Image (spheres, rainbow, N blue to C red):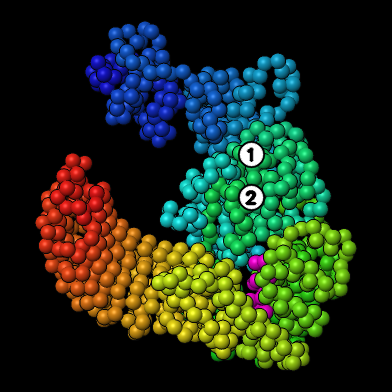
Amino acid sequence: MLAEELVLKQRTKILHALCSSGSAEHLERVLDILLAKGALIWEDYQNIQVPGRTLYTNARQLLDLVYTKGVDTCGLFLAALKLALPEAQAVGLSFSESCSNLQENDECQSTSNQTLLAQRPSLVHKLQGCVDGVLAALLDSGHFSSADCDEVRLPIYTPTQQARRLLDHVRSRGDLAASVLLQYIHQKQEPGLPLNQRELTPPKGLLLSKYQKKLSSSVSAQACFLSTYAGTSHMSLDDIYTDGQLELAEVNAHGPLGLEDIVGLVGIVNEEADTVLVSGEAGSGKSTLLQRLHLLWARGVALQDFLLLFPFSCRRLNSEHNELSVQELLFQHCCWPDRNQEEIFQFILDHPHQILFTFDGLDELKQSFTDEHRVCCPTQRAPVHVLLFNLIQGSLMKGVQKVVTSRSEAVSPLLKKHLRKEVVLKGFSPTGIDSFVRKHHRDPTVAAKVLESMQANTALLGLCHSPVLCWIVSQCHKELLGCGEGSPKTITDVYLMILQHFLQHQSPLKSTMGLGWLQEHLKTVLLLGQLAFEGITSTCYIFSGTDLEACGVTEKDICMVFLIKSKDMSSTHSKCYEFSHVTLQCFFAALFIVLSSNTNRSVIPKLFELENRETGLTRVCFTACLPSSDQQQQASEKESKAAETPNLQITAMFVSGLLSQRHQNLWLHCCPSAAVEKKARQVARCLSKGIQKHFRSIPQPVQGEKKSMHAMPDFVWLIKCLYEMQESRIAKDAMSKLEVDHLKLTYCNIGPVECTALAYVLQHLRNPVGLQLDNNSVGDVGVEQLLPCMHICNSLYLRNNNITDEGIRKLIAKVIQCDSFQKIALFNNKLTDACMQDFSYLLKTKQVFISLRLGNNNITAEGAKQLAEGLKANQTLAYLGLWGNRIGDAGTEALASSLERSNSLVWLSLVGNGVGSAGACALANLIRKSTSLQELWLTENCITRTGVECLIQALKHNTHVTSVWLRNNDLSLEDAEEMKQLESRLIF
Ligand code: ADP
């Protein structure tokens, strides 16, 4: 008889056997076994063991549940019953022959809580007689309060029940509490250990738990405040943290990710590797995201599979000049164990999967990633960067997960080889901006005003996708809201605004009105500028008191909020400072380049020169421009490879912006105009030369093909510099020489900010181009930014760019006025039926439009019907792609009937749209009538033999169609073979 039937038939007998003694022990024993075997989950257990309910009710609940779970669970239940009941009670019951194996799994599970569950029956046994000891350990480690202990010790409980209540309580307190319990039991049982020593040596779990507490409180203290640019005031991370957009670097794989996905299973590309990379632009929120993860871990709300988390800042590791072992690195730079260092480190070595390391800002490390020097032994000392690279590769501390952040541009292919996965942080979404501003300004009227002002200026809104700029813009809202001096347009404008804001607000004198503010604070700006410049050119981001003194920076300058005290996990270092954001350091370096008369004439050409930078020459040249610094430091700088390109690029962008004609008045009384003008001419020449160099590298087209340019990474940077200059003459000059038909900028990290710059520059092209921006993060705001260059676009490719109906509405309103606009590709965005009316309007209005590709969106039959209205009135569309939507038969019928009148359509794809035979018959009518259609794609639908027969009949009347693709439909192999014989143009 099947186990299920046995359970059902013997229900009364089983209930009697379990409950007639009046003791809950038998039922609880059965429950222990079922939990250990995974036949019941914790929620089941709680639903059965409801306090205050009668024993019979609980037992009935168990029987019901076991029965509904099916034959396997019933088998396990009978086996558990046999084991749990004393023989006398089991008399008369029959147990299934296939009684399952109840051997307990005494291996350690991946978490202590899982071990607690898997070994529950034996733990109940082992705990008897030592419940008090465990309670003391839990009390000592801070996991239990004395009220918790009293609850476990309630006199109504038998010893086994006390043991079970203890296990239940421990479970609810998390993994660390569970490990304290397990360690205690283990210690108790360890043979050969003299009794006195057993009592004197604190259990390992306890030691670890104390260290864990110290570490997490230190991590929490580091992470709970976000340093703000107001320097002295700190904002609680909880109050301000806003989710950024996090995606896998491998496109199309998944939707947006959550914080836990960073170390989760999603998107792993290399199972062997331990390192996850979080990449993103400067200011996209990488450090803040790590800070959030640290805080959530320290509070026990996230990443709970990791018992210990060690956070590192690469910026701070730069200043570690001693060789260290891994143990020293962990303990000196993160958290010092007060006792038993060796044991704690041994625990780390023995449990790599329970440990997490984070390294913030790998791009800020002086040395670039290499796998040349191998260190495999955790006790071997090595320079810190060597340790770090070996940790990342997994040659050291294999199995420990590492999360590393870096700017995207600084990630070398060599590093990519060692990655478990890469996730990209793409700044705030439009709703993210909104919610950030509301969090930033508690007063809703102020928040509403700031938002309104940001939304009125689309260039500004574009900038605000970058959290750091959003922060600045939101912070400087007063300037934004009102003084009528024109709100900021470029990133340089925003940084100038913050400079003015803080200089004026810090000044004890009544602030200078007009343009004199810079002059008034010139000395400070120059001092900070020199510090920043020297730092940028020698990859130095943390400055000691001596560095500041050497530059002449005083306490007063420090109070200016641009420099903040460096957070340091270890207390060994003396006071250090850093710029409140690396981009601010770049800005000050740029100010120095513009204002200082001490810099070498070649600084600007070197800054913009690309080849030299790759070899690190720039740094050497720059350093030579300044009074020579410490010999030893220079030697070590030469040793290290250049990892500073991204910062130099940001600096160059600011230099372009500051030297723009628009800001010339600012420098009037600060430095000689002739010098500034000369520098401005140098920048204009460099940009023009840089762009020309790109153009020259474009290969001649193969005969018959269009001339196409695939942008090199620096192209976008040059375009951004041109935008910062805001001088259309230079942009026009640069662009007039570009003669291409197609401009390809795929995978170039193009977001709204870059779109603004692109549109500004590309609008000066002489001939229309195809603009291919696939696989970027353009979004709706980016689309809006692109509008000014649409008149020069004949085709726009925006596959995989997070665009919604909203963006499309604005795009279409613009492109219907652009004569040359003919093609659009929007594969894999977020379009729904709501924008189909807009496409319909586009088709009706533009009788030059030839290609519409809307694959992998969210279009249903409703949307297709609206699109069909537009198709009816169009006589130019040649390509229509709707792959991977949900158009179904009804939508297909509507499309087919409108397209019957078209004599331009040559290619139609309805792959993967749930099209059945009704749809296929409608398409057969289209084939019968069309004079232009050549290819029809119907792969991955549910078309049956009837539908295909319709298509065959229609094809008899059509000679233009060359192929109809029908793979993966509802047809047997035989049917497909037979149909293929009848019509060779069908492809199965
Ligand atoms: P990155 O490390 O990518 O250069 P940061 O994490 O330092 O960027 O972010 C720069 C600033 O932007 C932060 O100081 C903070 O003001 C703001 N910021 C970044 N991310 C967030 C976020 N998720 N929520 C709120 N503010 C953020």
Count residues near mark 2 (Cα–Cα under 10 Å), then give few for <14, some for 14-19, many for 20+. Answer: many
The disc placed on residue 398 is 1
- Secondary structure category for the residue under label 2: strand
- Please state the extent of the stretch shown in magenta in the rendering: 644-655
- Asked whether 377 or 443 is in front, the reply is 377
**x and y percentages locating residue 902 in the rendered image:** 19, 73
Identify whether 237 is placed above or below 657.
Answer: above
Q: Amino acid at mark 2?
A: Thr
Please tell me which residue is depicted at 14% across the width and 55% down the height of the picture: 952
The residue lying furthest to the front in this view is 703
Secondary structure, magenta segment, majority class: helix
Q: Is residue 648 magenta?
A: yes
Question: Label 2 belongs to which residue?
Answer: 358
10 Å neighbourhood of mark 1: few (<14), some, or many (≥20)? some
Q: Residue at x 80, y 55 (%)?
A: 573
Residue 592 in the figure: left or right of residue 894? right
Of labels 2 and 1, earlier in sequence is 2
Query: Can I make out residue 368 in this image?
Result: yes
